[in-house]
Amino acid sequence: MNTVKRYLRLYRVLVAQFLKTIMQSRVDFLIGLLGFFFTQVMGIAFLYLVFQQIPDLQGWTLDQLIFIYGFAQIPRGIDHLFTDNIWLVAYRLVINGDFDRYMLRPMNIFFQVIAEKLQPDALGELLIGTILVARALTKGIVIVDGLHVALFFVSIFAGALIYTSIKLFFASLAFWLKVSGPFLQIAYDMANFAKYPTEIYSKGVRFLITWVIPFAFVAYLPASFFMKADTSAGVVGIECGIAFVFWWIAYALFHRGTQVYESAGN
């Protein structure tokens, strides 16, 4: 317990220092935030354009798809905000030898990686996601009761853990490949498939994004539970199970990678 408290205190100090740095460059912060916000707005505009041509998509209405889109942004935004520094492991820290500094400190290495940087641009994703979920509430397309509200927050946490696990897994390959960024980018981009009903994809793609790189469990599948009374709460349970299994695999690979790491810097 004392160890946990020590890490929490240290994390607060690191976050405070980072926020102080951000506030010293407020223009850059606002530009980044607005950039991410408008990127998501363009995604919504695309849906509106599609539904100008068709009445529904495999039985799903525009309002339902907008909810799925918004729901997907929240766990992604949480992951983006708190663990964005993992990308540097995949692209730069290992091959440049900069990972040495984490190895030399008497602290958990993963904690050091994620605590070094927050990504404030992620607030744009969280903002648009929250707005779209609130819109769904006003439209009456989501089920609101004690069970669904409780499982909403559980699902958000599990979805964020899935995002982080997938990112950590592919980033950890850098300990053997030196650079794993392209593989991580390809895998992470597959999250875009999860913003739409999986029924519109081929069986191979459905299997891939459901069970191999399970982004369907961070958006479409749990979002279906919150909109349709005939969808079992078990889907959130499966999401949690997948989240913890993938986290265990990803962290084990990362830990093994730190054991075989050899500085590649000059």
Image (cartoon, rainbow, N blue to C red):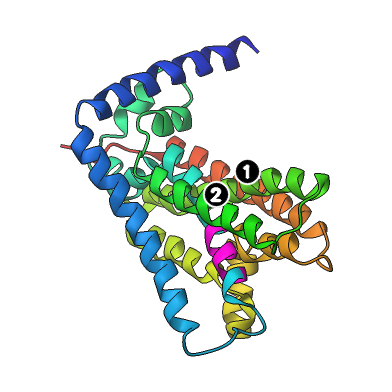
Q: Say which element carries label 2.
A: helix
Gap in angstroms between the C-alphas marked 2 and 1:
7 Å
The answer to the question of whether label 2 and label 1 lie on touching residues, with beta carbons closer than 8 A, is yes
Q: Is residue 167 left or right of residue 62?
A: left
Q: Is residue 161 visible?
A: yes
Image quarter where the C terminus lies is top left
Residue furthest bottom as drawn: 53
Residue 250 image position (x, y, % from top left): 55, 47
> In the rendered structure, which amino acid carries the disc numbered 1?
Phe
Does the magenta-highlighted stretch encompass residue 101? no
Q: Earlier in the sequence, mark 2 or mark 1?
A: 2
Range of residues picked out in magenta: 64-71
Q: Say which element carries label 1.
A: helix
Task: Please name the residue shown 67% across and 49% down the image.
Answer: 155
Q: Is residue 26 left or right of residue 164?
A: left
Q: Locate residue 227: give its quadrant.
A: bottom right
Does the magenta-highlighted stretch encompass residue 70? yes
- Of the numbered discs in the image, which one, if any, rests on residue 157? 1
Residue 91 image position (x, y, % from top left): 29, 50
